[in-house]
Amino acid sequence: MAIKKVENGWQVDVRPFGAHGKRIRKVRPSKAEALALERRILASPDSYVTQTGDRRRLQDLVEQWYEHHGHTLKSSRDRVRSLRKLADALGNPLAKKFTAQQWVEYRAKRLKEVKANTINHEHTYLKAVFSELERLSLWSYGNPLQKVRKVRTDETEKGYLDGYQINLLLDHLRAQETDDCYYITVICLSTGARWGEAQSLRAENVRKDRIVFIGTKSGKTRTVPIDHDLAKQLRQRRKLGRLFGNRYKAFARAIKELKIELPEGQLTHVLRHTFASHFMMNGGNILVLQQILGHQSITMTMRYAHFAPDHLEEAAKFNPIATQG
């Protein structure tokens, strides 16, 4: 896309539908008018390009999505990298001819190579591309994945550490040369923080008996109270800057050495599950837990509801056998 000076004014030269879409070149007497025209074309490309001329391919849509929206996401680089690979795996078809049937056929083959969750993530990412471009008036052919259901999956087991394992792990980490891994683990167990949130913690974010987590997965800042002695120990480490180095491998090594068996893919995340599970077992409130963990939906937090001492105990009180007589 460009605006350049030409003999009789300023020329707008754009391809609103990507590299394979129709090229629009128009001249305006002033640069300001040319810039205004460019904005109008990008805002409502269908007003300037007939639908039959749309030659954009799936890769073009991915790039356009990234340029206009994707780059604002926290995981933008990983997301666009995945989408580029996905478009290539699908054969980079003409976008307006891409159908739900093509996706289903791709999915059937892909399921022989990866887990259903991976496919569902790809489904979500690609569907979002069409939806977002549609919202921005950069796409007018509908969303081919709108009515396609995701692959049904079983709920994964949420592993957690019991009291004995917690003490065993902390004693093991306390004996290491550096105490970084120990303190990161303690923070996760005390606040339900993700490993990355605790590991990247800065001294400025440890307030009086509080930890303020910024740059979280949801993008929202959250504050969690902590033990007075822990807050004091963290503040004594340094006044400014990051408190810890990267200790992921040290934690993985400790779990292996202690022979603690965890569900697949839940290495450091077991600490977050451990906090949530014990919080509920000790009588914590599910709505408070939602705030602490930073879940946007209570549905996510409800995975821990069954740990509550009185969870569904009405089943024993009000079943037809118990109420007879």
Image (cartoon, rainbow, N blue to C red):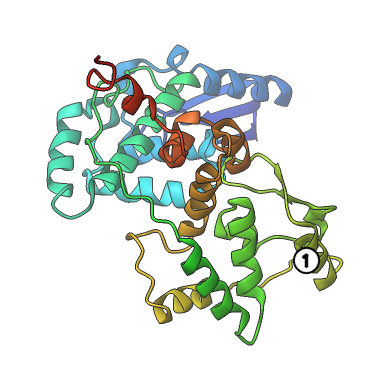
**Image vertical order of residue 256 relative to residue 107, above or below:** below
Task: Determine the residue positioned at 85% across, 52% down.
Answer: 208
Query: In which quarter of the view is residue 228 placed?
Result: bottom right
Task: Determine the residue positioned at 32% across, 42% down.
Answer: 122
Task: Determine the residue positioned at 32% across, 37% down.
Answer: 58
**Image vertical order of residue 8 relative to residue 84, above or below:** above
The N terminus - image quarter: top right
**Camera-nearest residue between 154 and 33:** 154
Task: Determine the residue positioned at 25% across, 21% down.
Answer: 147
The x and y percentages for residue 241 are: 79, 66
The x and y percentages for residue 252 are: 45, 73
**Camera-nearest residue between 191 and 316:** 316
The x and y percentages for residue 132 are: 46, 26
Residue 33 visible in image: yes
Query: In which quarter of the view is residue 101 placed?
Result: top left
Count of marks, rendered view: 1
SS at circle 1: helix
**Image vertical order of residue 228 relative to residue 12, above or below:** below
Q: Which residue is mark 1?
A: 234
Residue extending farthest to the top is: 47
Q: Is residue 211 left or right of residue 301?
A: right
The x and y percentages for residue 283 are: 56, 40
The C terminus - image quarter: top left
Q: Is residue 30 left or right of residue 129?
A: right
